[in-house]
Image: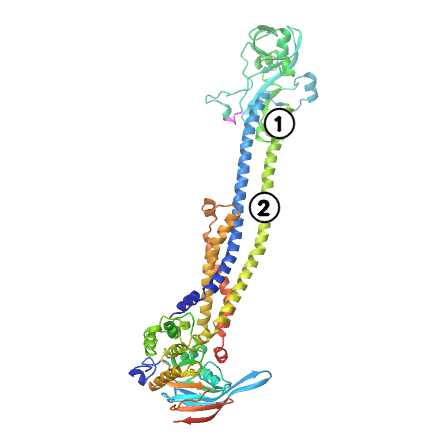
């Protein structure tokens, strides 16, 4: 199984590389610099992330590993521009996310970042094809139907294009969610426990898809609370909001 | 995939929710349109009732007018125009007027555009002793009726009086009152001698039960000559036109505007009584119309109060209902909202999705509500559907207003939930899992 063709092996976003900004600096897809996030809860402050920094290069697959509540999801959401940190900065493809306006931030998310969640979050009233095509409404150009069909074929879902999410298996649902995340040819894929609800077979398929994406030049940051598989570029161990260990290739 | 595509598919998926919202708007708009239609139909019905009552009153009055015109004409003259110096006591004492006025007066009245008098008859009347028979009589010189020239219907095309009460007495003839003819044994065609002149009895008049029964009528010129009163008369008999519902005073006003030095004496109280009865009947009809108008106005007032209370309440209830409906929809769709945010959909687009759905709901509900309200309001007032009355209740302006107002109501009601959806923090939703 491959995520994309030869062209995407060099650039996962293809030729329409709109997420590259003029202010892009360096080659890293994602730079997290001194990220701190605190929550106020029941009279005391909870530190979800504390001075977290990391840098992911294109074509790398990184795993964020830690127990529940360690701050993995908070880090992914902050890295994806969905959760404003108290301190620190996040760069995606050179864009300093939290200095952008709401519209510009949405544009960067549409063009540069893909999200995959444990719960799939498919829209129940849209067919598989329409779910994959959903990000098109955030894109100004309307020529993504071909890309959606291509992704469905890649993920062996072309026979399910007209089905609704309720008619799919959990593995198929996650593949649809992954196809949706890849529709806009993102540079960065943020995956939060994407295999958490899957059996080993389906988990294997999803991880293989992610590997294909990385091989095509994409960057993956995957959060998981379980043991990671061997062969990843880097494993970040996170505990109580701090990265305690980094194992890299 | 377009925003409208998402809206269409969401509506198709959550048909029940959309239909409930649509029904809600339909009911609200139907109550508004129904109330307006009810009031308009009521107004139409009231106008028709009043028009029918007025037409019926008019028909009855016209019928009565014809009846009374005939009755009054049959009863003879009921007004005597006298010189203003004439003492009524003198008149009663002598049985005839004792003051004189020019004959010209009758022509002034006849050409004076007077509306309240008909059948003008100039007279020169004197109570005298019939020298040849040694009998007290009233001698009445008459010229023949002078038509009221302001009423051309009384004239033929040749300008001749069409239908006089009193016919001209031919020269050399006299008319006799019933009692005189009886007492003197005279009948039509017989000869008699009066003030040294020979006359033939033109006709004997029917018994009247008044001084007419002892009156001899002959030419005005003869009587003027006998008493040296050439060009003079002492009264003008007339028929007061009571059919026009005018008050008696109107006759005096009319006459005195032309002849300031005369007075009007009314005779024939039976005519007056009948005329007044007729006036009262007309007033009763008018009162019935007024009472109906008041009743309908009261009914309309009660309905307007009800509408003023009910319609805003229903609209408010609909708005609250739609608010909670869209709020519920936003809550149910928060996972999808979060995902849309992650794929780069802006808050504005998400807000637009919910508001557009509300506007669609309002548009469809407004259209349905308009026609439902129109039908209910019309049927409530007893206006059958497919009738011309029903089609006259249709108002393109109101439909247009409703088609703007209903979506505006739905959008206003859905505004806060839509803003909430737009501002929903995807991180909060996604991190719950």
Residue B182 sits in quarter: top right
Q: Which residue is mark 2?
A: B297
State whether residue B238 is above or below residue A178: above
- Mark 2 secondary-structure assignment: helix
| B149 drawn magenta | yes
Q: CA distance from mark 2 to mark 1?
A: 34 Å
Label 1 resides on the chain identified as B
Circle on res. B274: 1
State whether residue B364 is above or below residue A16: above
Is residue B357 visible in the rendered image? The answer is yes
Residue pictured at 38% horizontal, 69% vertical: B2
Q: Position of residue B115 (x, y in %)?
A: 56, 29
- Mark 1 secondary-structure assignment: helix
| B235 drawn magenta | no
State whether residue B89 is above or below residue B33: above
Residue pictured at 54% horizontal, 34% vertical: B58
Please report the bounds of the magenta region as a residue range.
B148-152
Magenta-drawn stretch, dominant element (helix, strand or loop): loop
Label 2 resides on the chain identified as B
Question: Tell me, what colour scheme is on the image?
Answer: rainbow
Q: Position of residue B351 (x, y in %)?
A: 46, 70
């Amino acid at each position: 199984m491959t995520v994309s063709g030869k062209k995407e092996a060099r650039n996962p976003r293809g030729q329409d590389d709109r997420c590259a900004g003029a202010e892009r600096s360096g080659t890293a897809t994602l730079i997290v610099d001194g990220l701190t996030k605190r929550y106020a809860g029941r009279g005391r402050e909870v530190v979800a992330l504390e001075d977290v920094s990391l840098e992911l290069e294109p074509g790398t697959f990184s795993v964020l590993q830690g127990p529940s509540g360690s701050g993995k999801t908070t880090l992914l959401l902050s890295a994806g521009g969905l959760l404003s940190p108290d301190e620190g900065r996040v760069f995606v493809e050179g864009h300093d996310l939290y200095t952008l306006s709401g519209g510009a931030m949405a544009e960067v998310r549409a063009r540069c970042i893909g999200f995959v969640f444990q719960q799939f979050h498919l829209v129940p009233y849209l067919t598989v094809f329409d779910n994959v095509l959903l990000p098109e409404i955030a894109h100004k150009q309307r020529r993504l139907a071909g890309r959606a069909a291509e992704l469905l074929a890649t993920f062996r879902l072309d026979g399910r294009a007209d089905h609704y999410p309720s008619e799919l298996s959990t593995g198929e649902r996650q593949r649809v969610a992954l196809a949706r995340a890849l529709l806009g040819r993102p540079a960065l894929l943020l995956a939060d426990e994407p295999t958490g609800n899957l059996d080993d077979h389906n988990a294997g398929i999803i991880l293989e898809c992610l590997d294909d994406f990385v091989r095509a030049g994409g960057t993956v940051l995957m959060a998981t609370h379980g043991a990671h598989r061997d062969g990843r570029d880097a494993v970040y161990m996170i505990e109580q909001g701090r990265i305690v260990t980094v194992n890299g290739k | 995939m377009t925003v409208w595509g998402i809206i269409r598919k969401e509506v198709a998926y959550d048909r029940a929710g959309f239909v409930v919202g649509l029904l809600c708007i339909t009911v609200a708009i139907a109550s508004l349109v129904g109330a307006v239609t009810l009031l308009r139909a009521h107004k139409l019905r009231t106008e028709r009732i009043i028009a029918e009552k007025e037409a019926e009153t008019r028909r009855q009055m016209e019928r009565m007018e014809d009846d009374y015109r005939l009755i009054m004409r049959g009863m003879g003259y009921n007004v005597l125009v006298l010189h203003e110096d004439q003492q009524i006591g003198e008149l009663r004492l002598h049985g005839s007027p004792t003051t004189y006025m020019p004959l010209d007066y009758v022509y002034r009245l006849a050409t004076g555009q007077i509306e309240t008098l008909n059948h003008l008859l100039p007279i020169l009347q004197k109570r005298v002793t019939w020298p040849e028979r040694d009998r007290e009589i009233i001698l009445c010189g008459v010229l023949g009726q002078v038509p009221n020239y302001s009423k051309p219907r009384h004239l033929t095309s040749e300008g001749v009086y069409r239908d006089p009460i009193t016919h001209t007495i031919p020269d050399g003839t006299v008319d006799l009152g019933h009692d005189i003819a009886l007492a003197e044994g005279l009948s039509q065609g017989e000869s008699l001698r009066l003030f040294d002149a020979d006359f033939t009895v033109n006709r004997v008049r029917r018994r009247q039960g008044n001084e007419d029964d002892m009156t001899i009528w002959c030419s005005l010129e003869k009587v003027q000559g006998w008493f040296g009163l050439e060009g003079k008369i002492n009264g003008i008999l007339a028929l007061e036109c009571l059919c026009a519902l005018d008050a008696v005073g109107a006759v005096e006003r009319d006459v005195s505007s032309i002849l300031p030095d005369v007075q009007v004496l009314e005779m024939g109280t039976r005519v007056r009584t009948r005329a007044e009865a007729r006036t009262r009947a007309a007033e009763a009809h008018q009162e019935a119309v007024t009472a109906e108008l008041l009743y309908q106005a009261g009914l309309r007032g009660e309905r307007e109060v009800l509408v003023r209370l009910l319609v805003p309440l229903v609209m408010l209830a609909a708005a609250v209902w739609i608010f909670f409906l869209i709020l519920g929809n936003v809550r149910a769709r928060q996972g999808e909202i979060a995902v849309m945010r992650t794929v780069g959909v802006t808050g504005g687009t998400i807000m637009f999705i919910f508001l557009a759905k509300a506007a669609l709901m309002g548009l469809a509900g407004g259209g349905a509500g308009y026609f439902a309200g129109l039908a209910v309001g019309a049927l409530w007032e007893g206006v059958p559907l497919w009738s011309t009355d029903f089609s006259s209740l249709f108002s393109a302006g109101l439909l247009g207003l409703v088609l703007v107002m209903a979506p505006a109501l739905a959008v206003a009601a859905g505004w806060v939930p839509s803003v909430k959806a737009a501002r929903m923090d995807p991180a909060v939703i996604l991190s719950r899992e």
